[in-house]
Amino acid sequence: MKNALGEPQSVLVLGGTSDIALATVRLMLPRRLRTVVLAGRDQAAMSRVADELRALGATTVGVEPFDALATDDHATLIDRVFERHGDIDLALVAVGVLGDQERAEADNAEAVRIAATNYLGALSTCLPLARHMARQGHGTIVVLSSVAGERARRSNFIYGSSKAGLDAFAQGLGDALHGTGVRVMVVRPGFVRSKMTEGMPDVPLSTTPEVVAKAIVEGLARGATLVHVPRSLRYVFSAIRHLPRPLFRKLPI
């Protein structure tokens, strides 16, 4: 249950080693966040993070196995988290892979892996999450989308299309939950310097996990449903979305 100031006291992180999600948790711990549940594939890495979070003030840190592609297991995972920890005030849905565009264009299995992880993996966890939160009468689901989903570009249209699907799903879920006490906040970062983009050159308006985390916390405080990071990307991609296709195809993106 949220504290008297309306701040979350418990969080579930789907994608338990996500740089953005963990930066968000670290930022929230001084704000009386006490219970953290990390769900992901890398158990050893999550165990190390769990020790760090306890040292930073978390009183309870749980670690759960979670594979975004194992969709048949997702409802059971969400049930188990709520059974073990009670109310979950906040869920950070940080499931995602960038993948290799060139390989994906030539290899159907790689394209399907990207799409299934980014879209189906999130969908099949958000739905049971929404049901549990609606029953408890409160909660927020933060979905990490991307500006890449606003208009799929030649350089990463497989990743971008998967994020477009996720973004549309998350917005629709938020509309469906209106009036239940549960809300959905969609976060659209630009290029983030993180493990996912390691080795890639910076692009204009690049950002960091810590900057995205700060935007998430601020968005939660003001009840936002959509957050761009940096904020200027909202206007940049609004213009890109409305470019006529012949012009859009000439852009080096």
Image (spheres, helix red, strand yellow):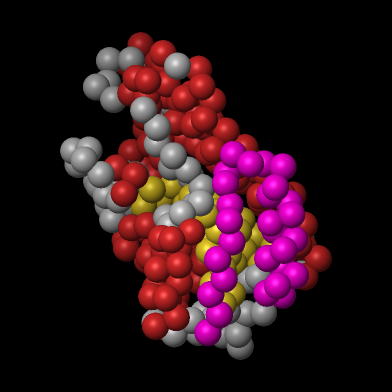
* Residue 76 visible in the current orientation: yes
Which range of residues does the magenta coloring cover?
59-86
On the rendered image, what quadrant is the C terminus found in?
A: top left
Q: Nearer the viewer, residue 155 or 64?
A: 64
Q: Residue at x 42, y 76 (%)?
A: 51
Q: Nearer the viewer, residue 41 or 194?
A: 41
Q: From the viewer's perspective, is residue 127 above or below residue 16?
A: above
Q: Residue at x 59, y 61 (%)?
A: 64
Residue projecting furthest to the front: 44
Q: Position of residue 47 (x, y in %)?
A: 45, 67
Residue projecting furthest to the right: 135
Q: Position of residue 106 (x, y in %)?
A: 41, 13
On the rendered image, what quadrant is the N terminus found in?
A: bottom right
Q: Residue at x 36, y 52 (%)?
A: 229
Q: Quadrant of residue 37?
A: bottom right
Q: Position of residue 210 (x, y in %)?
A: 32, 63
* Residue 173 visible in the current orientation: no
Residue projecting furthest to the left: 201
Quick check: 154 left or right of 31?
left
Q: Residue at x 30, y 51 (%)?
A: 194
Q: From the viewer's perspective, is residue 201 above or below residue 92?
A: above
Q: Quadrant of residue 10?
A: bottom right
Q: From the viewer's perspective, is residue 88 above or below residue 232?
A: below
Q: Quadrant of residue 83?
A: bottom right
Q: Is residue 89 magenta?
A: no
Q: Position of residue 12 (x, y in %)?
A: 58, 65
Quick check: 133 left or right of 58?
right
